[in-house]
Image (tube, grey):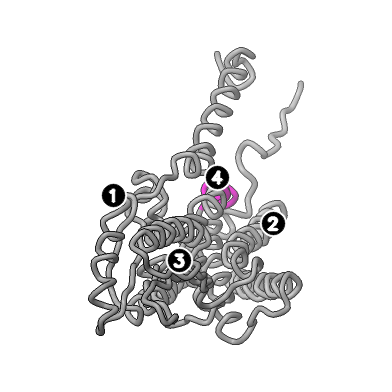
Amino acid sequence: MSGPNTTKPGALVSIAVAVGAVAVAVLGILTFGVQTTAAPDGVPLAVAVPEQGPAATALRPVAQRVAGQGGEEISWTATTPERARAMLTDKDVYGVLELAPSTDAAPGLAPTVLTSGAINPSGTQLAQQVLTSAAQGVSQAASAQGLAVQPVQAEQLHEASSAARSAPLAVTALSWIGCLAAGAVCTMLFTRGGRVAGLGSRLSLLLGSAVLVTGASAGLLAWWDGSLPLDTDVLGFMLLIAGAFAAVQGALLRLLKLRAMAVLAPLYLMAPSVAGQVPELLNPAYRAALWSWTPFRFSTEGLRSVLQGTPGAPDVRQAVWVLGGMLLAGLIVLLWPGRRGSAAQQAQPDAAERVVPVGVH
């Protein structure tokens, strides 16, 4: 008769080795695979020239030539400076090349590379490289025609410090792992004690995790950069992030107990790898399979907009809907009454843990 105690050691070793190989494959796909397959594809940029006047007539062909460069890697929009800045604020483009007439007496060109601190740093970095290269090419062509060319200027809307650029992703990752740690520990303590968390305990865990994790994250942000605007909008959005994460995690932990960690823990690995990139830099497979639905990108980009003073950006509204939906769904599971007698059943030890007295005559 075979059983757990009669399984051959070689089979146990084979199972362990297979689990390790699967773990490497899964973690590699979710983390390093995102970075190693990154490549620009349709990165949205804009080139802007004045709408009217002699300068517009002279610069419009130049803008059209710029918009024809880059192939499939860059998606150019030729527009006016006012419209380009509005598109940059709404994150419809990641950068703008403004072509304006020189202010000198002689006719010439004054190119400006315009970026925004409210854009994901990966998108801003690529936009700055492409736009600077394009501006230098236009300047060289203008100089060859005998025009006076001013040096390429760089301007940033919604200026962001190093801490401000890193803060949205950091808060997202820390909120997930902080709420997850609280939920896992609480579940473990109740399970070991042979008890089931009641409604009051579940709601206390949700509220306490959300508030304390938000407070801890806010304290870190204030330490990293005291100039960050930790006002009501920012703190309220951070509280929504932590509350949504705690609700979803609490719901899964209630349904699956500690087995839920097999799902919740790997999801954390997607935060820095997927949410840290703009979709135009991701491999199409990752864009469709991971980026399209992961909640981390909604919380990261929404918080970035709120933190940088653009709360009206479309990604903020999207994030509120997604995070609000997560919070509501998690609350429904947490508030749903348990089956009658389930508490008593769950409090009983498993059959494998019961001690069966055996009499010896």
Mark 4–mark 3 CB contact (< 8 Å): no
- Of badges 1 and 3, nearer the viewer stands 1
- Marked residue nearer the N-terminal end (1 or 2): 1
- Of badges 4 and 1, nearer the viewer stands 1
- Marked residue nearer the N-terminal end (1 or 3): 1
**Magenta stretch: dominant secondary structure:** helix
Image quarter of residue 219: bottom right
- Which residue is denoted by mark 2 in the rendering? 185
- Marked residue nearer the N-terminal end (2 or 4): 2
- Marked residue nearer the N-terminal end (4 or 1): 1
Residue type, mark 4 in image: Ala
- Which residue is denoted by mark 3 in the rendering? 298
Give the side of residue 247 with respect to residue 81, left or right.
right
Mark 1–mark 2 CB contact (< 8 Å): no
- Which residue is denoted by mark 1 in the rendering? 71
Which disc number belongs to residue 262? Answer: 4
Decide: is 165 above or below 100. above
Helix, strand or loop under label 2: helix
- Of badges 1 and 2, nearer the viewer stands 1
Q: In the depicted view, which residue is nearer to us: 92 or 212?
A: 92
Decide: is 28 above or below 20. below
- Residue 203 position within the rendered picture, expressed as x and y whole percent measured from the top left: 59, 73
Image quarter of residue 37: top left
Q: In the depicted view, which residue is nearer to us: 111 or 312?
A: 111
| Stretch in magenta | 256-265
Alpha carbon of mark 2 to alpha carbon of mark 4: how far?
15 Å
The residue drawn where x is 39% and y is 62% is 143
